Amino acid sequence: MSETIPVLFDTDIGSDIDDAVALAYLLKQERCELVGITTVTGDTVQRAAMAEIVCRAGGREDIPIHAGLTEPFLHGPGQPAVPQFDAIKHLPHRTDYAIDAVDYLRETIRSRPGEITLLAVGPMTNIAALFVSDPEIPSLLKRIVLMCGVYRHGQQSDSVEREWNALVDPIATGIVYKEKLLGVGLDVTLQVTLPAEECRQRFTAAGGALGVVGDAAEVWFKHSDRITFHDPLAATLIFEPDLCHYAQGAAHIHTDNTPSAGKTEWQADESGAHTIAVKVDAPRFLSHYFEICGG
């Protein structure tokens, strides 16, 4: 087996179902040392409780979970609701989470310099606060991997100009993009989808964490006929990078409080700090995901 990779997972689990689908993968991926989970935006205590429920269903009650920041830095729509929590809140979970995710991230990364991959799949508020409060942190990480942005406009994303994680807190997004990172954007993630009924069948067959995610997904299916595997794709690339092709360059984030806030503009540059996924082998990705998770 290849080397185990320590991962910190920052997530807005409970809004789009794909965060929970990504967590189910991290729990089952034998090469993943899931060091901890932090939640961001809106009711982060409910988000932490939902992450705990999924972890419990996967037989993992040992993973530290910390609630994070609730509001964007200065402007942005925020994301107050956690609709999927209602579907599984009857299952055992804690209610005593403190809002201490940024401190937890700082202490954990500093305790393991050069080891940890930071996987952020929600708005960038926690991560930006971490980088501003301790500017040395990015240099202490092994890698930063984001599900964020739309890089190649007019590709798979069609007319979509802005990606949700980037626009919820555009100033935070701009801060994080000052660092070297891998960005996985909508122009690629929209290529990996499954219809609702196939998801139901596969999640039920897998059971465990993915089975509980399937219960929460029924809230999602009230307004969507499919799941797009945005966050799971970013998670799998930590362990199976050849599922995608990449480009090097620089992403500029619109941070002003205007209708373009959160928009990402991409410029190819061999010396740029940002690597982006540009194409995914969707059948291979889906095969890998369910090989790991079951179903």
Image (cartoon, rainbow, N blue to C red):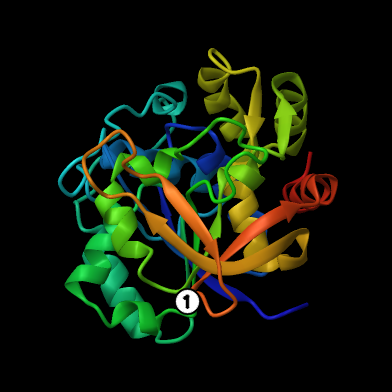
Q: Which residue, given by chain and number where applicable, does mark 1 sit on? A: 116
Q: Residue drawn at (30%, 48%), measured in percent from left and top? A: 170
Q: Quadrant of the C terminus?
A: top right
Q: Quadrant of the N terminus?
A: bottom right
Q: Report the side of 293 relative to 127 (left or right).
A: right
Label 1, secondary structure: give it: loop
Q: Residue at x 45, y 86 (%)?
A: 114
Q: Is residue 216 above or below residue 262?
A: above
Q: Evaluate whether residue 30 shows in this view.
A: no
Viewer-nearest residue: 68 or 55: 68
Query: Residue 175: x and y, percent?
Result: 29, 62
Q: Residue at x 27, y 50 (%)?
A: 255
Residue found 18% across the figure and 49% down from its top: 73
Left or right position of 68 against 197: left
Give amino acid for label 1.
Answer: Ile
The percent coordinates of residue 279 (x first, y second) are: 73, 53
Identity of the residue furthest to the bottom in this view:
113
106 or 158: which is nearer to us? 158
Rendering quarter of residue 269: bottom right
Residue 277, percent across and down?
A: 64, 58
For residue 189, side relative to residue 280 (left or right): left
> Residue 105 location, x and y as percent?
31, 68
